[in-house]
Image: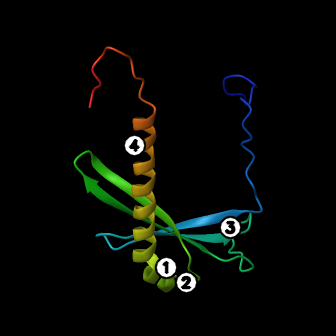
Amino acid sequence: MMIGNDRNHGIDFTVDTQNLYREEGITDLKVASIRRLVPIHLDGSEDPSRTPLFIGHTELMSPEGPIPLQAKLDAGSFKEAVDVFPLAMNQALSEMVERLKEMHQEQEDSRIIVPGFPQAR
């Protein structure tokens, strides 16, 4: 079955069958959402030779709306993921604030100055 045309637009959509994970979502319905990525084989059975991955997610509210924060949780079990969640979210927040400061500075540095025109502030 062909959809549209036969061009692939330079994108490789081949599924990496050696790197499959089943995703489980866990939340406390308040602050924490933790995704547990369980390694699986192509037939869907768990792959015990690989370690599960944990990804933490939360949202901060701002006047402009929710701001998502996400970080890999260095954990070997769900309990460890819960334990490192606060530190990982604080680190992700610090990195986001630093990136925003850098972006703001770059924007300030790139203003075009035209002689004879007042500068907007």
Q: Earlier in the sequence, mark 2 or mark 3?
A: 3
Question: Which amino acid lies under the numbered mark 3 shown in the image of this protein?
Answer: Gly
Farthest residue in the left direction?
63
Question: Which amino acid lies under the numbered mark 4 shown in the image of this protein?
Answer: His
Asked whether the residues under the numbered discs 4 and 2 touch, taking CB atoms below 8 Å apart as contact, a structural biologist would say no
Q: Earlier in the sequence, mark 1 or mark 4?
A: 1
**For discs 3 and 4, the disc positioned in front in the rendered view:** 4
- x and y, in percent, of residue 100 in the image: 41, 49
Q: Where 22 falls versus 14 (above or below)?
A: below
Asked whether the residues under the numbered discs 1 and 2 touch, taking CB atoms below 8 Å apart as contact, a structural biologist would say yes
Q: Earlier in the sequence, mark 3 or mark 1?
A: 3
Whole-number angstrom distance, CA of label 1 to CA of label 2: 6 Å
Q: Where 1 falls versus 72 (above or below)?
A: above
Q: Earlier in the sequence, mark 3 or mark 4?
A: 3
Residue picked out by circle 1: 81
- x and y, in percent, of residue 48 in the image: 71, 80
Q: Where 61 falls versus 13 (above or below)?
A: below
Whole-number angstrom distance, CA of label 2 to CA of label 3: 21 Å
The label number, if any, that marks residue 77 in the structure image: 2
Whole-number angstrom distance, CA of label 3 to CA of label 1: 24 Å
Whole-number angstrom distance, CA of label 1 to CA of label 4: 33 Å
Residue picked out by circle 4: 104
The label number, if any, that marks residue 44 in the structure image: 3
